[in-house]
Image: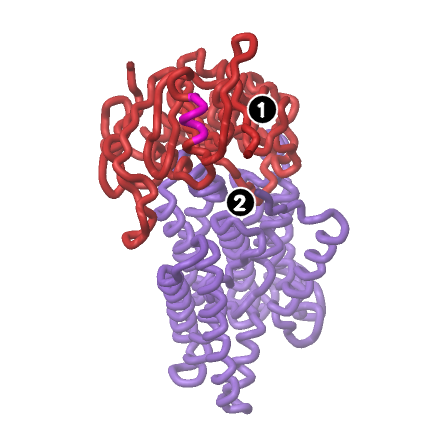
Chain colours: A red, B purple
Amino acid sequence: MDKILSLKEIHYRYHLDAPNVLTDLSLDIPSGKITAILGPNGIGKTTLLHILLGLLKPFQGEVAVAGKPHREYSRQELSQLIGLVPQLESIPFNFSVFEYVLLGRSPYLKPFQLPGKEDLRITEEALESAGIYHLMNKPVTELSGGERQLVQISRVLTQQTRILLLDEPTAHLDLENQNRILSLLKRMSSRGITTVLTTHDPNAAIFAADHFVLMSQGNIAAQGGLRGVITAENLSLIYKTPIRVEQTNGFTMVVMDKVK
Amino acid sequence: MNKKTYSRTILILGLGILVLLLASVFVGRYPKPFWLPPGLLSQDLLARQLVLNLRLPRLLTAFLLGMVLSATGSVMQMVFRNPLVEPGFLGVSQGAAFGAAVSILWLNRHPLVIELSATFFGLLALLTSYLLSTRIRYGGWVLRLILSGVAVSAFFSAGVGVLKYIADPLTELPELTFWLLGGLYSVTWRDLLFALPFALAGIVIAFVMRWRVNLLSLNDDTAFSLGASLTRERIILLIVTISATAALTAISGIIGWVGLIIPHISRRLFGASAEKSIPAAMLLGGGFTVFADDLARTLLPGEIPLGILTSAIGAGLFIYLMVSIGLKVRRDG
């Protein structure tokens, strides 16, 4: 497996005297694939993404990007390599969609530089490939949940990174919008972009991902391909509720079992 | 707004403000109310001295003050991700007021001493707010700074209250009160020179770093992922802009509302991106303050404190914006 991101024996806690959120966690993310990190709410999925991004520094252990430890990259180099779509981006000012998406070009600007013609062109392209070119002049504060998520993904598209981290990209979205977002991610992955997304919804993960990571109690419970990881036994264990995995017409589907 | 329209609008705005500045040289109550005929300058020595030594430094100070307050307001609102923040936030205004009061009562009533004392205490209040916020153990960093800013501000405001109470009502109290109301009536070239380096540093840094200000208005994790060095960039921006505000507040006294309302107007007219809204806010703020100061020194035979006028006009505009078109700022997510 060609790994682009790797975590080695990571320990993390928010304060010195707080309990560990992640304990002795090791994980390799395959290059050019979509990896879904699954687990119940509050298990440390966002923390894990923030560690991959470099925003949080682990107390112990090492994070490597393309074979080189995080600390050997400058802030600018790292931001040209890894993009992030956070779960709930609150934007208190009404940037237009274009202005907001253009911010994705920041990693390529010198400290006092403003975006130029090329940056504007890349931004337009990103809006087009996300299918929201027509929203260009709309204020971001007036978008629906699905549109807003597409706008955020357009912003990381203009960032032109090899790695994309997405925190619960389909949470709070209806089925049509979930489909739009996940299909867009699949298209990007087919162009060789490594994608890591967290989700608490196994069906969203099955729809999009190639590689599955199950998290439980600050560590990895299972990882690998669909068949090996998405099993009734694994899921029932980490979600602490009876779960069935069904096959219909070649599709795998996760359903909650009735509690007896 | 596209680049071309923006450039054209800024050019027109700039020319308008230039005309306002030129006209303001001749607006006043000498030799008779409202207008000094330009031809008089070559004949009347007093008129010439009035223009060169009083009106010009006063005009330029008003312009710089407006620019600095608006730039600081814009930067702070975006860096703190809160559209209701203004430059007095974090105790700077009350700290400066306390410093001026200490100087008037106990140190020296020489303007330079008042200015130095006001700047010193303004920055001290900022530092105290910051240090206090690092000791609070809950909430995000914005909440921690707001809480400590409120506390420090109240503390200095109580100090000003005590000093007013013990000030000599015949000599010290009037001067103190007039300073607190804010005004540019006594500005000299020397005052302007004192504040100029701080003001220019604030204006230039806010201008060249305006793209970074955009980044800092996003979530911490998003801003980080886009390459922002959060702590370092926030500290640089806040220190230079607030120092500029403190240095000018030391001359002018407390001038309210410019730093709150002008950034709002600028964002409404030119969009939220700081790339366009910060330069525009600086121009609008400078023009607004010069205009308010023209009114302050012309409307009545005696001087109207500038702070009263900017507050009255600013509050009026604020109400108008809220009622008629809405501020278009929403907190969401």
Please determine whether, in this image, residue A211 is positioned above or below residue B257.
above
Q: Is residue B52 left or right of residue B265?
A: left
> Which residue position holds label 1?
A178
Which residue appears at 71% of the width and 48% of the height? Answer: B326
Instruction: Determine the residue located farthest toward the front in the rendered image.
Output: A260
The location of residue B307, given as percent across then percent down, is 60, 68
Instruction: Determine the residue located farthest toward the right in the rendered image.
Output: B324
Q: Residue A58 appears in which quarter of the rendering?
A: top left
Dividing the image into 4 quarters, which one contains the N terminus of chain A? top left
Residue B165 in sight from this viewpoint: yes
Q: What residue type is labelled 1?
A: Gln
Dividing the image into 4 quarters, which one contains the C terminus of chain A? top right
Q: Do the residues labelled 2 and 1 touch (CB within 8 Å)?
A: no
> Which residue position holds label 2?
B278
Which residue appears at 52% of the width and 38% of the height? Answer: A89
Which residue appears at 65% of the width and 42% of the height? Answer: B269
Q: Mark 2 against mark 1, which lies toward the viewer? A: 1
The location of residue A117, given as percent across then percent down, is 50, 22
Bounds of the magenta segment: A230-236
Q: Which amino acid does label 2 sit on?
A: Ile
